[in-house]
Image (cartoon, rainbow, N blue to C red):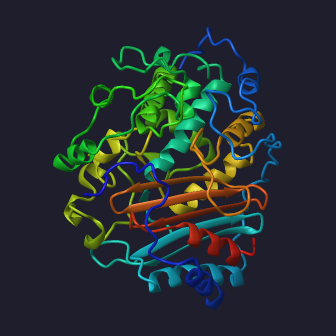
Amino acid sequence: MRDQVSDPARRIAAVIVGAALVAGACTSASTDATVAPTLATAIATTPAAVASPTSPTLSTSTPTPPVTLFGPLPAVALEKEKATALQGVLDGVVRQGAPDVIAAVVTEDGTWAGAAGIGGPDGRKATANDEFAIASITKTFTATLILRLVEQGKMGLDAPLAKYLGDLKVDTNGATVRQALEMRAGLADLGPDVADQIHVDAARVWTAEDIVADIDPPIHAAGESYSYSSPSYELLAFAAEHATGKSYAAALRAELLDPWHADRILDQGPETPTPKPWAQPIGAYLGAWTPADVGVGGSILCISSATRTTGGGSMASDAPSLAAWAWHLFAGDILEAPTLNLMRASSGPQFAYGFGRAPFGVENYESAGAKTGYGSQLVIFPLSHAVVVVFANDVDFMTDPVVSALLKAAGMS
């Protein structure tokens, strides 16, 4: 049975080779007064050139240069020739056997979004505006939210995570907020039993108390080593609730989404039914699930899957909205430049602060997600000022070759 929650691996088995894709592209709440360090001080404690016990191992021994911020989000569409080439990539993916593929691209020259294939069990064609379960890409939003609250003085990076969890009874392993963001809190990842719990009762709405009661004991001392942990980000989401006095969903809306008109990006749950149309997997890609299971409770994959993974794998978006939001992030619209530099300098082969790196041969910041029937990838290329998003209703679909082909079709390589 496939994992119903966020998959710690970025990508799994390939179903399409990159050469075929390239060929397709060619043919067609209150301020926390006790927060001691300022943001600049907090950043300075973990310089990019030094791998401290509480910072992720970086792929380079030299400091990450300051970010060159993107310009305003382009207001025009990419030219017709590029749009035709981009659509050709997606059509080629489906010809090679993918059930569907949805993508969005933003460059300084304009925006584009497209889709190909079947996006549901009733034979409906996928569309560029289909809502999609983005799984672990949620962690990028959680990290951004926490850093925004740090900027506002409502949280401290080096404060104990437990300080922001109120009355929740959970063993945080003595980890700090920074360690949780860096996946160095020493907390275990989700176990295989969680998938069964979700499938057994797809209509269950999990509470914070339910979730923390289900977290396994720590696996090593905080700061000792890296270990991917979705529960670390679930606890960060609950910390944001405590710091803002709002639900995680409401805090996201207020701090990260509504100011940039990201109406179709949301944390799924009982507060807000997920808007339609939805991209949905067909039976062959659902494992033990059936098409009737998808959408129970008004969320995708279902309300149980969404609420069990709050902050770690609970969100949904359409492709163009996600790409536009990522552009705003790297334009300095959401976080201040020093904070964005912290995110960039701390990410690497290991996931930290909402991003990892993918093997594209150039600087990139990547986040990916996987749930039963849903595979997604967001990649930001700061040197070429480009954002690429790829969705497919197949958890085994390998998105890297598609990202590369789309980048080439957009004239960026």
Residue drawn at (36%, 14%), measured in percent from left and top? Answer: 167
* Residue 173 x/y as whole percent: 44, 20
Q: Residue at x 71, y 84 (%)?
A: 81
Determine whether, in the image, residue 326 is placed left or right of residue 205. Answer: right
Can residue 196 be seen?
Answer: yes
Image location (x, y in percent) of residue 24 = 58, 86
Query: Image quadrant for the N terminus?
Result: bottom left
Tell me if residue 286 comes above or below residue 147 in the rendering.
below
**Foreground residue among 73 and 224:** 224
Where is the C terminus found, in terms of image quarters? bottom right
Q: Is residue 301 left or right of residue 348?
A: left
Residue at (58% x, 44% y) in the render = 350
The residue positioned farthest toward the left in the image shown? 200
Q: Position of residue 343 (x, y in %)?
A: 67, 39
Image height of 195 relative to 232, above or below: below
Which residue occupies the foreground of this view, 292 or 156? 156
**Residue at screen point 35% across, 20% down:** 170
Front in this rendered view, residue 91 or 66: 66
Q: Nearer the viewer, residue 392 or 180?
A: 180
